[in-house]
Image (cartoon, helix red, strand yellow):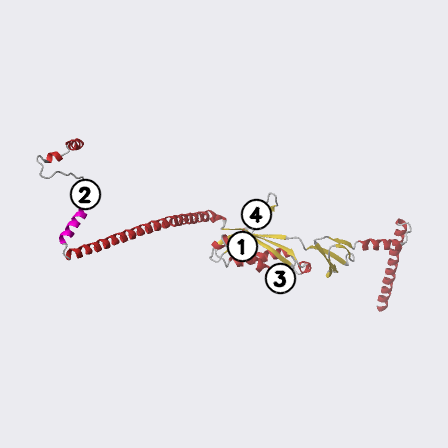
Amino acid sequence: MNEDLNNNDNFNKNSDKNDLKEQLNDIKAFMQKYLGGINIWIIVIAVITLWAAQGLHTIDEPEVGLVKRFGKHVRTVGPGLHYHIPAPVETVIPVDVKSVRKIEVGYETISPPPNPKYRSNKEEALMLTADNNIVHIEFAVQYKIQNAENYAFNVINARTLLKEMAEAVMREEVAKTNFEDIITTSRGEIAQSVHTGLQKLVNSYDTGMMVENVKLQDANPPQPVTAAFDDVNSAKENKENYINQATAYANEVIPQAEGKASHVVNKAEAYKQEKVARAEGDVAKFKNVLTEYKMGSKDVTRTRLYIEAMEEILPNTEKIILPKNEEGNSVLKLLDLNKLRNAGGESK
């Protein structure tokens, strides 16, 4: 049986050799028939030349070229004309390292400028604040590729990774901030904090990306409660307006009232000083008269006081002087009948 097996093996080997010879003869016949007897080496050289020429490549100005040999990165080339061993030995991946790129979180642009249109993404946009309210956040992140090797080889989908990182950092920052601050005064601070935190996170994964800017496009209450929120804001604005008006009125009226009060006080003080000075003068004058009166000149003092009193009284009264002891003096001569008649007519 062993001899039979050996005979079969020899037969199979001879058959394989015959088949190979037949194939070579067929190839030779084909080349002679269709290539007209051209030297095979010329064809081989031409094919190799064409293959080698495919290694010439140009890297544009904003790009760098990552050269891989059998899938492994071996070198990076800058802009210009370069050569690499053609595929499948080496391949070149161009990477734009100067252009600013953008990702959108909470919304997406569905129509570019000049007539842009946007579509909101509620799953990304709705976030929880520190005071347990819901806020609708839409923001954009601008970035550049800083390290082409890390960008191309360390992560599978860099844009998706950056978007998920940006959303996570924003949610963390919103969770530390009250609702009112987010929609009013703290937008700039939040954007700056997200910028810093996102860059640290990106660096920790060696993604090769650099965050240029974080811009909050929208920070508002969710759509179902927008109307109620607007009413609250309107009431707050009215309150502030009333307070400002009252403050302005108080600032105007209070100084005027204080000025008038000061004027009245000053006037009263002057009146007081005048009366006190006059009273003190009268007292001093009375003391002088009293002293003279006590010293014995009582008649002279009495007469002088009488004359001084008359000097004050008589200038303001109508005076009638009649001769003394003259006959025919009568009260009727002193009456002004025309004046009495006119007075009686007016009373009627």
Residue on which disc 1 sits: 188
Q: Amino acid at mark 3?
A: Asn
Residue 102 falls within the magenta-colored stretch: no
Point out residue 62 in the picture as x, y percentages from the top left corner. Answer: 70, 53
Residue on which disc 3 sits: 203
Residue on which disc 2 sits: 314
The quarter of the picture where the C terminus appears is top left
Q: Amino acid at mark 2?
A: Leu
Q: Which is more N-terminal, label 4 or label 1?
A: 4
Q: CA distance from mark 3 to mark 4?
A: 31 Å
Q: Residue 194 lies in what quarter of the image?
A: bottom right
Which type of secondary structure does the marked residue at label 3 adopt? Answer: helix
Q: Which is more N-terminal, label 4 or label 3?
A: 4
Front: mark 1 or 4: 1
Region in magenta: 298-311
Q: CA distance from mark 3 to mark 2?
A: 111 Å
Point out residue 52 in the picture as x, y percentages from the top left corner. Answer: 81, 55
